[in-house]
Amino acid sequence: MTSQSIPNKILKWYDNNKRTLPWRKKVSKSQKEYFTLVSEFMLQQTQVKTVIPYFENFTSKIPDLKSLSRVRDVKLMKCWEGLGYYSRARNLKKSAKLIISKFKGKLPSNEEGLKSLPGVGDYTSKAIMAIAFNNKIIPIDGNVERVLKRVFYLKKEKEISKENLHKKKSFFGETNRASDYAQAVMEIGALLCKPTKPNCDQCPISRYCKSYKKNDFEIVKINKFNKQKFFEANIFQNKRKNYYLLKNRKFNFLKGMPIFPMNEIPRVKFKNHIGKRINIKMSNMDMRIAITMKNNLPLNRNGFFVDVKDLSNLTLPSFTKKILNTIR
Ligand code: SF4
């Protein structure tokens, strides 16, 4: 293989097969930077097809960095409602303010500047540098990781370590179309090298792929220990059937968002619970929640009642909505 053959093959496939995504629209340079920033924040923890309508609504209501830096929190949260992981929205606004005040309104183009923005970590900074600023970087998201594991048939723990994946990335080589190329490699993972049933017949790099040759596409993952925790959600309704909610100070996620009063319980209490039980998967734990209808308000009354018909005007996290849907 020549050093150019892989980028050329991948880019040719990408040009003919890429998805039309709203953040890939041809726009001005500053608008592309804004679109990349917003889409990369939204794509942290959320799939492309879920993000599309949120991105379109968000950028039509908050069209640029300046308006994002000045947007009222109520409007910001309304635009993010349902997307989850609300700290992303708060960090996005904080980042916009910092870009205006510290970087003269221009999104920084280097790793140090980008990582100084709240909510921008290693992956997001690399993705922005590649996509918005055409740096020759292939950020490793879940899709790229899968492609690498399959091309090189990586199965052992040492082989699938982050360090080794970064080394193996040199397989992709580089090209001057760096922005397209980073997206093209991710697109192969998303459209062809799917977790189950990869579409190898269409794949531009199948001739280099060991998994294809061995006809074994199983992916080995590093076992992340996801803690299981048990909670009781306490539902209080007054005579008018209004629900009692609290501003969340209990969990590190959903800070300040309305939740039902919750307390941690032992596994055995959850198992013996007679009422409804639900599971909610958070990034850091598996929550098992026993739902209890209560007659008395908690002693520590720092919450508020919400009329059922006003619930739709409140920005409720999916977490609270799931509990509400279960009891209604
Ligand atoms: S040939 Fe198949 S398994 Fe290999 S990278 Fe392409 S889609 Fe994935």
Image (cartoon, helix red, strand yellow):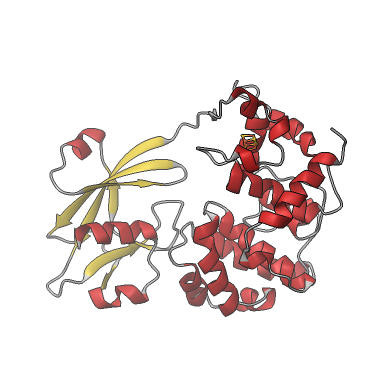
The image shows residue 225 at horizontal and vertical percentages of: 46, 31
Q: In the visual, does 273 lie left or right of 102?
A: left
* Residue most extreme to the front: 201
Q: Nearer the viewer, residue 23 or 279?
A: 23
Q: Could one spot residue 116 in this view of the protein?
A: no
Q: Quadrant of residue 229?
A: top left
Q: Nearer the viewer, residue 285 or 49?
A: 49
Q: Nearer the viewer, residue 189 or 88?
A: 189
Q: Is residue 64 above or below residue 184?
A: below
Residue depicted at x 72% and y 32%: 207
Quarter of the image with the N terminus is top right
Q: Nearer the viewer, residue 31 or 9?
A: 9
The image shows residue 52 at horizontal and vertical percentages of: 54, 64
Q: Quadrant of residue 133?
A: bottom right
Residue depicted at x 65% and y 45%: 188
Q: Could one spot residue 56 in this view of the protein?
A: yes
Q: Is residue 216 above or below residue 122?
A: above
In the rendered picture of this protein, how many numbered marks are placed on residues?
0
Residue depicted at x 69% and y 58%: 117
Q: In the visual, does 153 lie left or right of 15?
A: left
Quarter of the image with the C terminus is bottom left
The image shows residue 197 at horizontal and vertical percentages of: 51, 37
Q: In the visual, does 152 lie left or right of 47?
A: right
